């Protein structure tokens, strides 16, 4: 009846990052930090976990001599998010 929830996505900050990237496809680190209200250090750690899981891609580059970090959702990340939402539905519909 209850399906397992992905432990990578089942933390508030990582879920927020993936949810943001699902809607915008890619975003700068600073945009994600502002939207999630996370500290740079905590966000960096959580994004590395998402990257290691293959859910996001992180591209570091320079723009106008300033470092820029772009985060992109991967096809694996989209699929994992869809499965997570479906599995969460099994909890919401438990009494039906």
Image (cartoon, rainbow, N blue to C red):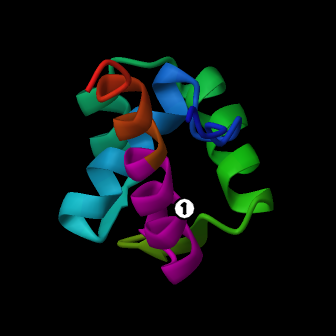
Left or right for 2, reference 18: right
Residue at screen point 58% across, 75% down: 76
Query: Does dot 1 land on a helix, a strand or a loop?
Result: helix
Residue, disc 1: 80
Left or right for 57, reference 28: right
Q: Residue 80 location in percent, x, y?
A: 54, 61
* Residue at the front extreme, as displayed: 96
Residue at screen point 57% across, 24% down: 11
Residue at screen point 49% across, 58% down: 83
Where residue 38 sits, quadrant-wise, is top left
Magenta span: 68-86
The one nearer the camera, 3 or 44, is: 3
Is residue 94 at all visible to an observer of this figure? yes
Residue at screen point 38% across, 47% down: 85
Is 5 rendered above or below residue 65? above
Q: Residue 12 location in percent, x, y?
A: 48, 21
* Residue at the left extreme, as displayed: 23
């Amino acid at each position: 009846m209850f399906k397992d929830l992905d432990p990578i996505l089942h933390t508030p900050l990582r879920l927020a990052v993936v949810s943001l990237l699902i809607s915008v496809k890619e975003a700068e680190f600073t945009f994600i930090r502002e939207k999630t209200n996370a500290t740079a250090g905590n966000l960096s750690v959580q994004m590395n976990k998402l990257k290691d899981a293959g859910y996001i891609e992180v591209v570091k580059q320079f723009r106008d001599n300033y470092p820029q970090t772009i985060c992109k959702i991967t096809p694996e990340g989209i699929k994992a998010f869809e499965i997570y939402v479906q599995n969460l539905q099994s909890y919401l519909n438990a009494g039906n």
